Image: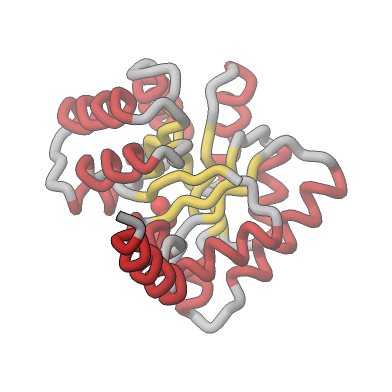
Amino acid sequence: MKFFIDTANLEQIKEAQDLGILDGVTTNPSLMAKEGINGAEAIKQHYKTICEIVDGDISAEVLSTTYEEMIKEGEELAAIHPNIVVKIPMIKDGVKALKYFSDKGIKTNCTLIFSAGQALLAAKAGATYVSPFLGRLDDISTDGLNLIEEIRTIYNNYMYDTEILAASIRSPMHIINCAKIGADVITSPLPSILALLKHPLTDLGLAQFVADAKKLG
Ligand code: G3P
């Protein structure tokens, strides 16, 4: 399973990269705004910097919602670096844009996936990744993991190449459950990734080993 980090924060991206387990980065307009990135040029520069830190797929989301504008914007984003993946919302014009980019060999990530039908359409349109939003479904008392399972079954049935990129991850258990289901990728904030490291018996065991090591001289 591939690990992406879901942030536009350069320090956190560097920290995950230093850990040696990072396969890519996802961002969205909210995450970019959180870092105070303003204006088209600043946004492009920020993506360029992320591409210089991480050698993997970097999702850059279009800000427009019409077919023509998404094509123009997506082509500009794709021109920043070969690792840029154009992130497109699951709307009617977005499906058309996915097909356009797929035909051109430009990678895409279809975002805001909340149903199996949406994921099926995105795969039909040739999306490289689909991003089902696990946590936001859980937030409205709907089982987000069930959606990941449904998409896995459908993609397996027809051997779609589209990769399931589980997004809106809120906890280490989300990551573990996605791995059990067979999501191809998880994109997570740094704290949930680091939480996978933790176990009190590891801490206790290490403290004992360090204490005993001192006796060895
Ligand atoms: O990048 C999309 C997704 O991961 C957003 O997560 O926590 O805002 O629901 P969240």
In the image, what residue occupies the spot 66% across and 51% down? 119
Q: Is 98 on the left or on the right of 61, as rendered?
A: right
Residue, far front: 217
Residue 153 image point, x, y percent: 80, 56
Residue drawn where x is 77% and y is 39% of the image:
160
Q: Residue at x 43, y 70 (%)?
A: 205
* Vertical order, 57 against 3 (above or below): above
In the shown orientation, is residue 121 left or right of residue 51? Answer: right
**Residue 139, position in %: x, y?**
46, 78
Placement of the C terminus among the 4 image quadrants: bottom left
Residue 66 visible: no
How has the structure been colored for display? secondary structure
Q: Nearer the viewer, residue 198 or 141?
A: 198
Q: Quadrant of residue 80?
A: top left
Residue 111 in the image: state x and y as whole percent.
50, 49
Residue 173, placed above or below residue 185: below
- The quarter of the image that holds ligand 1 is bottom left
Q: Residue furthest bottom?
A: 141
Q: Could one spot residue 163 in this view of the protein?
A: yes
How many numbered tags mark residues here?
Answer: 0
Where residue 170 appears, as percent x and y from the top left, is: 42, 68
Judge from the rendering whether residue 34 lies leftward or rightward of residue 151; answer left or right. Answer: left
Q: Nearer the viewer, residue 163 or 76?
A: 163
Vertical placement of 126 versus 114: above or below?
A: above
The answer to whether 39 is drawn above or below residue 152 in the figure is above
In the image: residue 61, left or right of residue 131: left
Q: What residue is shown at x 55% (from left), y 55% (from top)? A: 166
